Image (tube, rainbow, N blue to C red):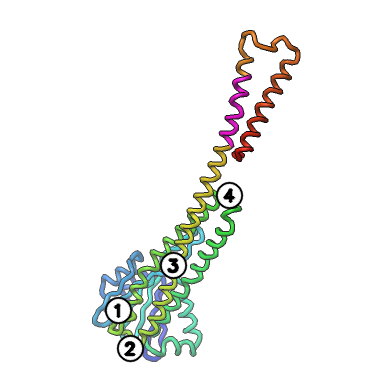
């Protein structure tokens, strides 16, 4: 937590984790950033955007962070100021590739030269590229969950499958909300006329844009598969409900004549066989014949 600074050549990287008002005041004094931008850094609920000023760019981007307790991806915000010879990154610490890259650059002189020796805009690219790549393990996990549902949908209990489908669908919706705005941000950075973005980096940002579009295409495919699996689950549910109703209907038809017969012989009137010592056996056999005949008929009609 706090502010960490890394210098290499003519480039300074300021990495702020869990920013405080004091950190923002320090940035204002050192770099003269606009107060509204610094206020956005503290709110942590801003939409992705790029604000262009005479001496810097202010960029807000979001990347998914998986919440294991709620089983859904949450947006992790990263705010960036890039100007001539510096890059300032501000985040809550939940996007571990940022701190990982900072620590690696701090510990490894060769890596520091590779990441920071070609200007602040190339460092910006490497950072965004790493965060985009960080999205794919989450997407692969969603794909694995979908494949597991595909394998279990005909063997597991339908309520369990429906619950899993709901979890995965919610995560896909959350990922779509996070990924889609980032495409416009990177597409804007790909333009050659952006200040403080070194000429020739359009190809590199174009590659990042391709990765984001690939992630979006994966989410579109996942959504279609989930919709298909939901339709299958609904069909299975309807089929099983119909099977239960059919069985209950058959039982009702079988019980109807038995109830009628037992009701007649339960009346306090003179009936056939009432003085016959084998009357009970005869009546039971008659009931059995009726049940057997109805079962034979249902079987012949392929109702059971």
Quadrant of residue 102 within the rendered picture: bottom left
Distance, label 4 to label 1, CA atoms, is: 54 Å
Horizontal and vertical percent for residue 191?
31, 81
| Residue that numbered label 1 is attached to | 57
From the image, state whether disc 4 or disc 1 is nearer to you.
4
Closer to the N terminus: mark 1 or mark 3?
Answer: 1
Q: Which of 99 and 187 lies nearest the eye of the viewer?
A: 187
Task: Count residues near mark 1 (Cα–Cα under 10 Å), then give few for <14, some for 14-19, many for 20+.
Answer: many
Closer to the N terminus: mark 1 or mark 2?
Answer: 1
**Could you say whether the residue bearing mark 1 is in a helix, strand or loop?**
strand
Q: Which of 189 and 196 lies nearest the eye of the viewer?
A: 189
Distance, label 1 to label 2, CA atoms, is: 16 Å
From the image, state whether disc 1 or disc 3 is nearer to you.
3
| Residue that numbered label 4 is attached to | 157
Which residue is outermost to the right? 277
Quadrant of the drawing holding the C terminus:
top right
Label 1 close to label 3 by CB (< 8 Å): no
Q: Is residue 274 left or right of residue 232?
A: right
- The verdict on residue 279 being magenta is no
Closer to the N terminus: mark 2 or mark 3?
Answer: 3
| Residue that numbered label 2 is attached to | 199
Closer to the N terminus: mark 4 or mark 1?
Answer: 1
Label 4 close to label 1 by CB (< 8 Å): no
Q: Is residue 14 left or right of residue 151?
A: left
From the image, state whether disc 3 or disc 4 is nearer to you.
4
Closer to the N terminus: mark 3 or mark 4?
Answer: 3
Determine which of the numbered discs, if any, sits on residue 64 in the image.
3
Question: What residue span does the magenta drawing correspond to?
Answer: 247-261
Horizontal and vertical percent for residue 226?
48, 59
Distance, label 1 to label 3, CA atoms, is: 23 Å
Quadrant of the drawing holding the N terminus:
bottom left
**Could you say whether the residue bearing mark 2 is in a helix, strand or loop?**
loop
């Amino acid at each position: 937590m706090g502010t960490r600074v890394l210098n290499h050549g003519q480039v300074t990287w300021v990495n702020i984790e869990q920013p405080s008002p004091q950190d923002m005041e320090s940035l204002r004094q050192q770099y003269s950033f606009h107060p509204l931008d610094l206020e956005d850094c503290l709110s942590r609920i801003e939409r992705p955007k790029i604000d262009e000023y005479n001496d810097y760019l202010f960029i807000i981007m979001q990347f998914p962070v998986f919440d294991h307790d709620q089983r859904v991806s949450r947006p992790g915000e990263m705010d960036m100021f890039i100007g001539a010879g510096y890059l300032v990154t501000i985040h809550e610490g939940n996007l571990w590739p940022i701190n990982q890259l900072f620590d690696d650059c701090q510990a490894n002189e060769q890596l520091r030269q590779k990441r920071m020796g070609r200007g602040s805009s190339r460092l910006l690219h490497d950072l965004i590229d790493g965060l985009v790549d960080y999205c794919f393990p989450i997407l692969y996990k969603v794909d694995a969950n979908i494949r597991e549902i595909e394998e279990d949908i005909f063997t597991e209990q339908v309520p369990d499958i429906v619950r899993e489908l709901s979890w995965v669908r919610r995560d896909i919706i959350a990922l779509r909300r996070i990924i889609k705005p980032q495409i416009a941000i990177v597409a804007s950075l790909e333009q050659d006329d952006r200040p403080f973005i070194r000429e020739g980096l359009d190809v590199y940002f174009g590659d990042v844009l391709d990765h984001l579009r690939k992630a979006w295409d994966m989410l579109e495919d996942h959504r279609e598969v989930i919709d298909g699996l939901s339709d299958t689950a609904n069909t299975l549910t309807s089929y099983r409900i119909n099977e239960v109703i059919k069985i209950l209907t058959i039982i009702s038809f079988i019980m109807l004549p038995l109830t009628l017969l037992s009701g007649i012989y339960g009346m306090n009137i003179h009936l056939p066989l009432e003085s016959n010592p084998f009357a009970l056996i005869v009546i039971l056999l008659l009931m059995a014949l009726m049940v057997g005949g109805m079962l034979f008929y249902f079987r012949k009609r392929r109702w059971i």
